[in-house]
Image (tube, helix red, strand yellow):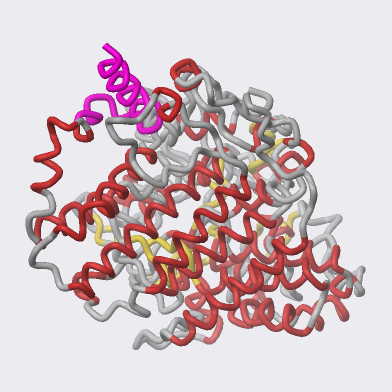
């Protein structure tokens, strides 16, 4: 009877951590032969390796990545009409409807749009326990595959940590002999989880290649620079205010009294993060990773080349800047969500909606052409930014000559024009330069009850420049690897960590300025000294922190960064407690179109909304799990 109880609780544990339902049977002894069959040959083991990869969250999928529609970087119409493929789960989160009974995008249980990441970790452990049994596997290849799976195991733990805060550590799968108490796992303190993840990544990096040599079949596989770059991201996250010295979660404890958050800020975490960033930079640059530069054999103006440098840093098929690119289905469907009705002469034109619509807050985030925030530039008319202006020949590189739009769209930095399309803008593609005109009755305007940009903005950055709308209800596109992490990311994380350790420094400026130079901007020092109404801002730690955070938000706009960065900086409660605005897109004339239209009043409840809730079902099954504060 006691043996049956143990088996019962192991089944419950699997259901708790993986949401695997019937799949739990593959860890019961009756099925050991099935697992062993997976490691009888190199080919079978490689299939299991790909199974471990298959759990990676689809970061380019607006259905499953909360960073697109669960924040306020994008917005879309609501409610979603029947039959419309726009996802509702992430928008439920953005609208304050996350819940404990059946959480949206539940990566703990693998439900409501989330993948079962505990099942992923279980399969990684099975692989690591059995890979040594494969008889025809070269030892060096065995070590490489094991390193890849260690990386994946670490990454799945990190994904859960970022979403849920303190989590259990599953170093090994439970044996059949596990006691009832062993089955009822507890959440572990944040610092312990971070150290476990970093240990796995360090171990993985030893046996990973510096670059992918077999590019025909292995692009997207894990390399040493990828492992070190994700290690840097883990440590920067752990050093950030959400996890480092966060007194809001000081009372989050296990039932045995174990404190899960260290409420004391520790600058040593930033030192550790800075060292990890530099290690990742050195490894990446040694492997040939470099900031992207557009070198296609086409004749374009210097302005267009700059735009293509910016757009293709993420949307080229395999950008030279990628440290880790995710190739499984990435950069395909998302282009259709972002693409407006760009070519009115094609029958397929109305198939493209541009529904993934950036908000006015996002538009205001980008700098002026002088490289400082719009509310700081003493040469830019911030007060009258919502007033109408008509573009002249001086503006024609970015705006349609003679077209009336709003002051917000004039004299902005190159990334603004490279990343965003809007009424009056120009959209360069391989098959021509297109004009965007989005007021009611115009080509890119709303045509029906659904299928349109709610805000009047389009995410140009997400559309590869070789996307072509065809005549007969079709299109061609160049699918690109989704940038899980690119070199500019590590540069800015390094600058952030350096500033947190010692304040402003020449080295911190150097790495920010590398990113700004590619974006066509002056240096931080030059821009603030000469054009900001706060010229000394970059000379203080607080000021440079603000600069780095805005630089990060701009550089990685629409890439899934902002959602998580606002949380780790503990700024989500400030940013996401505001009205969401778009333009009044149903108007035909500029005077009425360019009225800021409130779309939704967001509420972000702190500290509750900084982390996902664990489902009530999981808490009932395992009474040793404690719920996140506020849920």
Which one is nearer the viewer's eye here, 56 or 514? 56
- In the rendered structure, the answer to whether residue 504 lies left or right of residue 254 reads right
**The residue positioned farthest toward the top in the image shown:** 1
What's the residue at 77%, 66% (across, down)? 500
- Rendered location of residue 33, percent (x, y): 9, 40
- Which quadrant of the figure has residue 447? top left
- Which quadrant of the figure has residue 233? bottom right
What's the residue at 50%, 78% (across, down)? 309
The answer to whether residue 340 is visible is no
- Rendered location of residue 110, percent (x, y): 37, 33
**Residue 363, relative to residue 63: is it above or below?**
below
Name the quadrant of the N terminus: top left
Which one is nearer the viewer's eye here, 235 or 112? 235
- In the rendered structure, the answer to whether residue 116 lies left or right of residue 527 reads left
What's the residue at 68%, 62% (across, down)? 366
**Residue 280, relative to residue 267: is it above or below?**
below
- In the rendered structure, the answer to whether residue 618 lies left or right of residue 576 reads left
Name the quadrant of the C terminus: top right
Which one is nearer the viewer's eye here, 602 or 249? 249
What's the residue at 44%, 54% (across, down)? 154
Which one is nearer the viewer's eye here, 283 or 589? 283
The boundaries of the magenta stretch are 1-25
- Rendered location of residue 354, percent (x, y): 44, 48
- Rendered location of residue 227, percent (x, y): 44, 67
Q: Indicate whether residue 502 is drawn in magenta.
A: no
The answer to whether residue 338 is visible is yes
Report the magenta stretch's main SS. helix
């Amino acid at each position: 009877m006691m043996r049956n109880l143990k088996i019962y609780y192991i089944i419950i544990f699997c259901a708790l951590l993986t949401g695997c339902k019937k799949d739990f049977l593959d860890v019961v002894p009756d099925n050991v032969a099935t697992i062993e069959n997976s490691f009888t040959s190199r080919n079978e083991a490689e299939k299991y390796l790909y199974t471990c990869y298959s759990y990676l969250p689809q970061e380019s999928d607006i259905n499953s990545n909360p960073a697109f529609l669960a924040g306020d970087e994008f917005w879309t119409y609501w409610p979603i009409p029947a039959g419309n493929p726009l996802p509702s789960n992430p928008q439920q989160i953005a609208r304050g409807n996350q819940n404990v009974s059946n959480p949206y995008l539940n990566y703990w249980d693998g439900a409501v749009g989330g993948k079962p990441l505990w099942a992923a970790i279980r399969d990684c452990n099975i692989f690591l326990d059995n890979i040594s049994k494969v008889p025809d596997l070269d030892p060096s290849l065995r070590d490489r595959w094991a390193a890849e799976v260690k990386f994946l195991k670490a990454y799945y733990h990190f994904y859960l940590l970022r979403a849920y805060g303190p989590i259990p550590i599953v170093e090994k799968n439970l044996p059949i002999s596990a006691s009832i108490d062993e089955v009822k796992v507890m959440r572990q303190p944040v610092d312990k989880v971070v150290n476990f993840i970093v240990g796995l990544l360090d171990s993985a990096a030893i046996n990973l290649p510096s670059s992918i040599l077999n590019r025909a079949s292995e692009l997207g596989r894990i390399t040493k620079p990828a492992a070190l770059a994700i290690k840097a991201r883990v440590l920067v996250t752990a050093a950030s205010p959400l996890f480092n010295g966060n007194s809001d979660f000081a009372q989050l404890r296990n039932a045995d009294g174990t404190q899960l958050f260290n409420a004391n800020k520790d600058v040593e975490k930033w030192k550790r993060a800075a060292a990890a960033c530099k290690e990742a930079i050195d490894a990446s640059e040694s492997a040939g990773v470099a900031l992207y530069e557009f070198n296609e054999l086409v004749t374009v103006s210097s302005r267009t080349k700059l735009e293509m440098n910016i757009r293709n840093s993420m949307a080229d098929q395999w950008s030279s800047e990628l440290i880790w690119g995710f190739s499984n289905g990435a950069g395909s469907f998302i282009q259709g969500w972002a693409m407006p009705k760009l070519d009115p002469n094609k029958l397929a034109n109305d198939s493209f909606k541009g529904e993934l619509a950036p908000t006015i807050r996002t538009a205001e985030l980008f700098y002026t052409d002088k490289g400082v925030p719009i509310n700081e530039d003493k040469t830019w008319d911030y007060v009258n930014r919502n007033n109408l202006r008509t573009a002249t020949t001086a503006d024609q590189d970015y705006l349609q000559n003679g077209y009336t739009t709003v002051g917000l769209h004039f004299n902005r930095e190159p990334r603004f024009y490279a990343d965003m399309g809007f009424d009056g803008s120009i959209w360069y593609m391989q098959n021509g330069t297109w004009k965007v005109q989005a007021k009611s009755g115009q080509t890119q305007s709303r045509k029906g009850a659904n299928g349109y940009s709610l805000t009047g903005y389009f995410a140009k950055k997400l559309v590869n420049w070789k996307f072509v709308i065809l005549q007969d209800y079709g299109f061609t596109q160049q699918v690109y690897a989704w940038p899980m992490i690119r070199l500019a990311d590590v540069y800015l994380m390094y600058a952030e960590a350096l500033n947190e350790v010692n304040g402003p420094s020449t080295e911190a400026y150097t790495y920010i300025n590398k990113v700004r130079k590619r974006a066509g901007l002056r240096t931080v020092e030059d821009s603030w000294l000469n054009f900001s109404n706060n010229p000394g801002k970059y000379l203080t730690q607080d000021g440079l922190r603000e600069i780095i955070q805005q630089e990060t938000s701009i550089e990685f706009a629409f890439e899934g960064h902002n959602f998580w960065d606002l949380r780790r900086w503990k700024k989500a409660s400030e940013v996401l407690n505001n009205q969401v605005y778009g333009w009044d897109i149903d108007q035909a004339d500029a005077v009425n179109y360019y009225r800021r239209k409130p779309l939704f009043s967001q509420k972000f409840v702190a500290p509750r909304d900084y982390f996902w809730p664990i489902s009530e079902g999981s808490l009932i099954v395992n009474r040793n799990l404690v719920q996140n504060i506020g849920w």
